[in-house]
Amino acid sequence: MKDAHEKFGQSDYEIKEREILYQGKLRLVRLTLRHRLFDGAWGEFFIREILERPRASAVLPYDPILDRVILIEQFRAGAIADPESPWLIEIPAGLIENPAENPETVALRETEEEAGGKITNIKLLYEYFVSPGGSNEYIYLFYGEVDASHIAGIHGLANEHENIRVLNLSAEEAFAKLKNKEIKNAPAILALEWLKSNRQSLKKNQ
């Protein structure tokens, strides 16, 4: 039996078959696999369908001097079932499609592309699987400092059909949107909750 303090690892599962069901910008695969059970025995083989995509970076741009938060708003096809609107309030984010790029570099680039802002200080907050029951999507979540005094407008890459509006808000306005459940994007929620706990110390360090 596995001790309560022992961790399972890469040697504790077995993939019998991997079948690609669909390949586009995303990939859908069917896995036939099994894994060890907590009593130490091997379980039976079973099937799981997994949506595969590159890892991603997301960043919360914050100006600790002006006490302002930079959020963005854009249309999301995955949110069309929302009864209110498929336009979501988010933070800058992008896929790590080039193996030569690290997560931090992507966060810096996406802030410029999606919000027109330049980050001068960046810190990794969390990294996590988004929905591992059906996807391998993995996010690196950052905090980044910006000068919010001139960040505004519409941004995004036309060749990627992006039409992104900047929301330059006071921290209190951003927290109000969070409280009122206007923000339904997980990285933005996590980042703003972190900012609520760390805001005063960030302002004091200026």
Image (tube, helix red, strand yellow):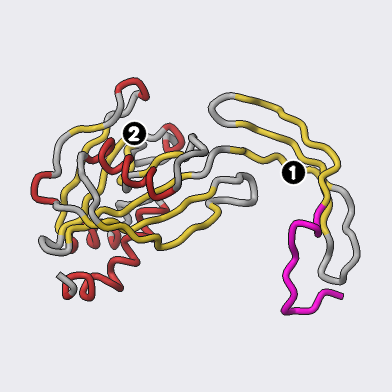
The reply to whether the C-beta atoms of the residues labelled 2 and 1 are less than 8 Å apart is no
Highlighted range, magenta? 1-13
Q: Mark 2 belongs to which amino acid?
A: Phe
* Residue at the spot 49% in from the left edge and 58% down from the top edge: 127
Residue 77 among magenta residues? no
Badge 2: residue crowd in 10 Å (few <14, some 14–19, many ≥20): some
Question: Pointer 2: what residue?
Answer: 75
Residue that mark 1 sits on: 48
- Residue 51 placement (x, y as % from top left): 62, 38
Magenta region's main secondary structure? loop
Between the residue at mark 2 and the residue at mark 1, the CA separation in whole angstroms equals 30 Å
Taking 48 as reference, is 7 above or below it?
below
Report the residue at 45% width, 41% height from top.
Answer: 101
Quadrant into which the C terminus falls? bottom left
Residue 22 sits in quarter: top right
Q: Residue furthest bottom?
A: 4
Secondary structure beneath disc 1? Answer: strand
Q: Which mark is residue 91?
A: none
Residue 186, position in %: x, y? Answer: 42, 53
Q: 49 or 118: which is nearer to us?
A: 118
Picture quarter with the N terminus: bottom right
Amino acid type, label 1: Arg
65 with respect to 100 (left or right): left
